[in-house]
Structures are given as structure tokens and as C-alpha cells.
Image (spheres, rainbow, N blue to C red):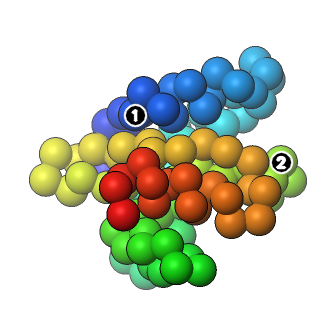
């Protein structure tokens, strides 16, 4: 099932920080995952997050662009079939997860 992808305002700003070629790669990865964004343990592409070094990210999933060192953290809104992009950032240790927790108010 194809989920509708929406970006938070902050995630739109995050994406704009990358050059056009990286934006294309990031969007392509998001589009691929949106075909089945469920967590891997439910047969999807998403890697579920939980507690990441004291950050409660339960209910969120991530996409890792390994070679680029970029993480995309998203939330599934299953009732509306929506994949909500919370943050797009370079890995930089666990900073991306700290920022994701702040953006969702945890």
C-alpha cells in the first residue's frame, strides 16, 4: 500500500539544506519506503526506533542512507495512511535522534 508522504515544516527546511543531487537521492529513498513504510517486523522497509540513548522515539521509524550518512526519521499515521517526515539530517552521532525527540515533543 502506498502511503501519502507529508513533511513537517522543519523537515522541508532540513531537505533544503542539501544540494539538489542529494535532495533527489533522499526523495527517491522516501518514495521507495512510502510503498511500504511499516516497520521491518511487520514486513515493511522502516527500521523502528525505540529508546535511543534516553530519547523516547517509540512509534517512529528511520531510513538510513548508509553511504551518505543521512537519516530520515518518520512517523506513521496508520488511520490516514500517512508517512510524516519529522527530520532529515546527517548522522552526526545521535544528534538526529535528539532533534527528532524535540520535534515531536518528547
Where is 50 relative to 97, above or below? below
Marks 1/2: CA–CA distance: 22 Å
Tell me what residue is drawn at x 45 percent, y 60 percent: 101
Whether residue 61 is visible here, answered yes or no, is: yes
Given residues 28 and 50, the one toward you in this image is 50
Q: Position of residue 67 (x, y in %)?
A: 86, 53
Where is 19 relative to 80, above or below? above
Tell me what residue is drawn at x 36 percent, y 44 percent: 84
86 lies left or right of 18: left
Farthest residue in the right direction?
67
Where is 10 relative to 70, above or below? above
Name the residue tied to disc 1.
8
Q: Badge 1 local density, few (<14 within 10 Å), some, or many (20+)? A: some
Of the residues tagged 1 and 2, which is closer to the observer? 1
Farthest residue in the left direction?
79
Q: Quadrant of residue 43?
A: bottom left
Q: Secondary structure at mark 2?
A: helix
Q: Assign the C terminus to one quadrant of the image.
A: bottom left
Q: Residue 68 got which mark?
A: 2
Q: Residue 52 got which mark?
A: none
Q: Secondary structure at mark 1?
A: loop
Tell me what residue is drawn at x 76 percent, y 18 percent: 20
Q: Position of residue 94 (x, y in %)?
A: 68, 66
Q: Position of residue 30 (x, y in %)?
A: 54, 42
Identify the mark nearer the N-term, 1 or 2. Answer: 1
69 lies left or right of 63: right
Q: Position of residue 66 (x, y in %)?
A: 79, 58
Whether residue 65 is visible here, answered yes or no, is: no
Q: Are marks 1 and 2 in contact (CB under 8 Å)?
A: no
Q: Badge 2 local density, few (<14 within 10 Å), some, or many (20+)? A: few
Amino acid at each position: 500500500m502506498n502511503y501519502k508522504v507529508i513533511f513537517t515544516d522543519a523537515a522541508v527546511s532540513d531537505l533544503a539544506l542539501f544540494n539538489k543531487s542529494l535532495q533527489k537521492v533522499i526523495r527517491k529513498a522516501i518514495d521507495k519506503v512510502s510503498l511500504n513504510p511499516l516497520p521491518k517486523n511487520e514486513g515493511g522497509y522502516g527500521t523502528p526506533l525505540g529508546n535511543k540513548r534516553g530519547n523516547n522515539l517509540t512509534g517512529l521509524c528511520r531510513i538510513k542512507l548508509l553511504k551518505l550518512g543521512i537519516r530520515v526519521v518518520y512517523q506513521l499515521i496508520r488511520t490516514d495512511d500517512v508517512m510524516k517526515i519529522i527530520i532529515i539530517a546527517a548522522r552526526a552521532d545521535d544528534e538526529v535522534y535528539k532533534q527528532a525527540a524535540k520535534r515531536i515533543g518528547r
